[in-house]
Image (cartoon, rainbow, N blue to C red):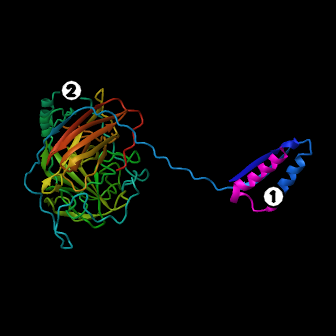
Amino acid sequence: MRLKTTLTVLMKRNLYILALMGLGAVALGLGGCVSADPQVVARAVEATLKAVSTPTPIVVVVTVNAQKPSIPTVTAAPPATSTPTNTSTAVPLPLASPTPLGAVSPRSDGASAVPTWPAQATPAPPTKAQPGKSLTPALPTEGITLTPRPTPLSAASPRSEGEAQAAATAGNITPTPCGDQACAASAGHFWLERPIPDGYVNYPDRTYAFGSTADGQREPHHGVEFENPSNTPIIAAEAGKVVVAGDDHTTSYGPATDFYGNLVVVQLDQTFQNQPVFTLYGHMKTILVRVGQHVNTGQQIGVVGATGVAIGPHLHFEVRVGENDYFSSRNPELWLKPLRYNGLYQGAVAGRVVDIKGRLVQGYPVVLRPIVVDSDAPRSRYVTTYTADAFGLAGDAILQENFGTTDLPLGSYTISVNTTKTYQQVINVTSGSLTWVTFVVEPPPLVPLASPTP
């Protein structure tokens, strides 16, 4: 940076000495910053001497070099949070089967199967997505066959929860949300084992959970993803009959053809509320079963790949209720048995976030922060409320939740939702149970808030 020091030489002779003293002060005061050329100072002195005998003021400019000063770093104070509101209801949902988890097919390398917890080191896929990105790219738009949209159903008149449950049992599901413990307990369906064996990554990826959009970058997700290297075994999550085994080049089983690549669909032996239940396994590299074959829980049905629209090896897993189509997908995290930790099943949390008019709030952050939990490495959990789409993405037919997550360590948490302000509750997560939470919030702004980065 260049600095200019200006010395105005006054016309009066009685300031002659002061002018010389001022020039000397400039030269000595700046020290090492003044130019090393002595001729610059000499010319300045000569100009000063002439100034006392001339009627016109002379401006003497001495140019110096100086270093640029450093700029301090300022750290902003954290924002204040709003006062907690609302209350929660813990709904115990015992597992469908109290027996230990089903047997898993032996590992090809001879290693024994061991319980897996998210904090445990696991094999990483050789191809990883960019941070905050899903392993499944945006839907293709050319050279595909789109699944036709169904004719919208007329809105049903409100019914009591007992009538809703009776209708569901008869196979006529009425979209009436749960509001008490008895209703939520009737929706319990922790039936499924993990579709990936122990010893691999057998917990869902959190960056693109069911119903989320990866912070608006993707279409709403109709399943969950298990990130694993290619050739990782895929096993049947529950016993049933194989109804699809092949590719989707010509027949669409989702939003478009060539979406899942190689896939398997199993219709389970069990039904839920008199409705068939299907499990879908997508992006497989190799399929080891055929249509019409009956598979048992834990039986290997293929290996992980990156076929279809996948850009990295992983298993895309769906649960479909009622029909084997994209419109009938439900949150797999509310169907999978929670993982075990310290010999106990962990828990799950689900609920509804609605505005003051009872409308579901879509695409907003839900944050669970541990207070006291049974974990060696407690961490916060970030999810978002489901985002609806043209393919009918929705919650469970009975629960009618719009967020849900599983594999939570047992203990107490704060759970908060942020719309126009932050709403917070305290909940308890218990073994093998679903903790049910509801929030009634002020109408949020038109543009959804970004999900916090884990």
Residue 450 is tagged as: none
Q: Amino acid at mark 2?
A: Pro
Q: Position of residue 30 (x, y in %)?
A: 70, 55
Q: Position of residue 7 (x, y in %)?
A: 79, 47
Q: Residue at x 86, y 42 (%)?
A: 14
Q: Residue at x 42, y 42 (%)?
A: 77
Residue 158 is tagged as: 2
Find numbered disc 1 in the image and state the secondary structure of the residue it sits on. Answer: helix
Q: Residue furthest left?
A: 99
Q: Relative to 111, say whether 255 is above or below.
A: above
Magenta segment's dominant SS is: helix
Magenta-span inclusion, residue 34:
yes
Q: How many dots with numbers?
A: 2
The segment highlighted magenta reads 15-38
What is the distance, in whole Å, between disc 2 and disc 1 at their CAs? Answer: 94 Å
Of the image marks 2 and 1, the number of the one nearer the N terminus: 1
Q: Give neighbour class at mark 1: few <14, some 14-19, many 20+ (Cα, 10 Å).
A: some
Residue, disc 1: 40
Corner quadrant of residue 35:
bottom right
- 248 on left or right of 104: right
Task: Verify CB contact (< 8 Å) between mark 2 and mark 1.
Answer: no
Q: Amino acid at mark 1?
A: Val
- Say if residue 59 shows up in the picture: yes
Q: Position of residue 162 (x, y in %)?
A: 12, 30
Magenta-span inclusion, residue 365:
no
- 277 on left or right of 148: left
- Say if residue 330 shows up in the picture: no
Find numbered disc 2 in the image and state the secondary structure of the residue it sits on. Answer: loop
**Observer-nearest residue: 336 or 420?**
420
Q: Position of residue 24 (x, y in %)?
A: 77, 53
